Every structure is written in structure tokens, then in C-alpha cells.
Amino acid sequence: MRSLVFRVLAVVLAAASLPALANEAAIRKAFAERMPNAPKIDEVRPSAMPGLWELRIGNEIRYTDAGANFLIEGELFDLKARKNLTEERVTQLNRIDFAGLPFKDALMWKNGTGKRRIAVFADPNCGYCKRFEKGLQELKDVTVYTFLIPILGGDSPEKARAIWCSKDNANAWLSWMLKGEQPAKATTPCDESAIERNLALSRKIHVNGTPAILLEDGNRIPGAVGPAELEKRLQALAAPASKS
């Protein structure tokens, strides 16, 4: 009797999921027909609002109706709970495994004990990165891992290679970013493959601009922030540990 109940329950649950599966397939089909040049839809799922469906394209969120007749670009708010549901979803999608980052492919420098860690994806010709780097010097007890990604064109690739291949590449990076001292060209053979791996990693985790700042809790800050704001974020990360 018990096994019969479980079989009946399984059939009921499967039947309940059929409308969602049918709608997902219909939405994908409709978009493929109506927007053949649009980026690939990675995920289709019901949103928190009845009748509204979430479309995930990479780490970006769009919305549509069940018939895929309308496309909405914007944010969905839960007014009762006072939450930005789109922002929460994007934050979730952008979260990364900080401990799993390939730190061997990054430049590293630290101030003080270095007990607080951040990772930064940066281009040597990025003006915002230079401003951010100067602000970082004001932080205490921080370790900074910089993943070089020359994405801005011009001589960014040459500068990135010269910096990475320097005898003291962290110092070469800081000298260029803080003082404008041109990195010397490498005179000995150097393995530059880390830069290509960094570019591949940046695409994989959807880093679309520089600087991109990754925190130890897996969250990120898309763009340069001042030292006061970053200090506030780092202190917030340390707060739960201090209370335990």
C-alpha cells in the first residue's frame, strides 16, 4: 500500500511539473523564431510574480510572459518584502568560489598582516583601475590578488606581458599603476600563458569590465569603489566571525 502511495505521489508531482516544462519549451521556441539573432537563453523559469517568466542570458536577467509575446528589461521588486528580486538573483548568479580562484596566475601584494583578501581583474591601461589601485594603498591588513586581463586594446597586451614577466611583477604593476613607470620589456623567456588563462576565466565568470572586485564571501563589486566603501564591505565580512 505504501509503495502505491509513493507511485501515485510521483505521478501527481510529474503531472504538476508538465505545465512549467511545456511553457519553458514554448518560450524557447517562440524566442528562437521571433528573435533569431538574439543571444542564447541559458535558463527559463517562473519568476516570483505569477504569469511572469525569468529569462537568464549569461548572468543577465530579462522577463517575458508565458506566450513570449513581450520582453521586459528591468528590475522586479517585491514591494511587500521590500526586496529587489532581480538584484538578488544577479548577485546569486555572480557569486564565485573565492578559494577556488587560480591565485598562481595573479600578481600579489599585501599591507600589514594581509588577513583580509580580495581579488581584482584589471587592465594596465584602465584609468578606473589606477584610481582604485591608489585607494587600495590606504587599506590595512589586506592581501590583493590582481588577475591581468588586457581587454582595452592598444598596447594593453604588451604592457600586461611586460608586467607579468618582470622579476618582481607585483612591484612592476604598482610602479606602473601608481607612478606611471613603464614596465621594462622582458629580456628572458617567460611563460605568458597565465594571461590567456585569466582572460578565459574572466569570460567564464562573466567579468565584463575592469576593475572587477571579488570578495572572500564570493560576492563581487562591479567597478571601482573608494577605499572607505571597500573598507566598509570588508568590515561587514569580518563581523559575523567576530560575533561567533
Image: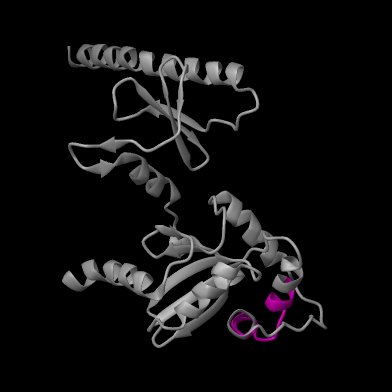
Residue beneath the point at 60% across and 82% down: 170
Provide residue 45's location: percent of width, then percent of height: 40, 27
Q: Residue at x 62, y 61 (%)?
A: 198
Up the image or down, 34 lies above or below 98; here it is above
Can you give x and y, in whole percent of width and height, for residue 131 in the image? Answer: 52, 74
Residue drawn at x 47%, y 31% as measured from the top left: 43
Name the residue located 65 percent from the left edge and 58 percent from the top edge. Answer: 199
Query: Dividing the image into 4 quarters, which one contains the N terminus?
Result: top left
Determine if the magenta segment contains residue 165.
yes
**Toward which corner of the image does residue 240 lie, by quadrant?**
bottom left
On screen, residue 124 versus residue 217, left or right, reads right
What residue span does the magenta drawing correspond to? 161-175
Q: Nearer the viewer, residue 204 or 104?
A: 204
Residue 244 in sight in this render: no
Depth order, front residue of 70/59: 70
Q: Is residue 33 left or right of residue 167?
A: left
Residue 23 horizontal side relative to residue 172, left or right: left
Q: Is residue 235 above or below residue 72?
A: below
**Which color scheme does this rendered protein use?**
one colour
Q: In screen coordinates, is 118 left or right of 35?
A: left
> Is residue 89 at all visible to an observer of this figure?
yes
Q: Nearer the viewer, residue 202 or 130?
A: 130
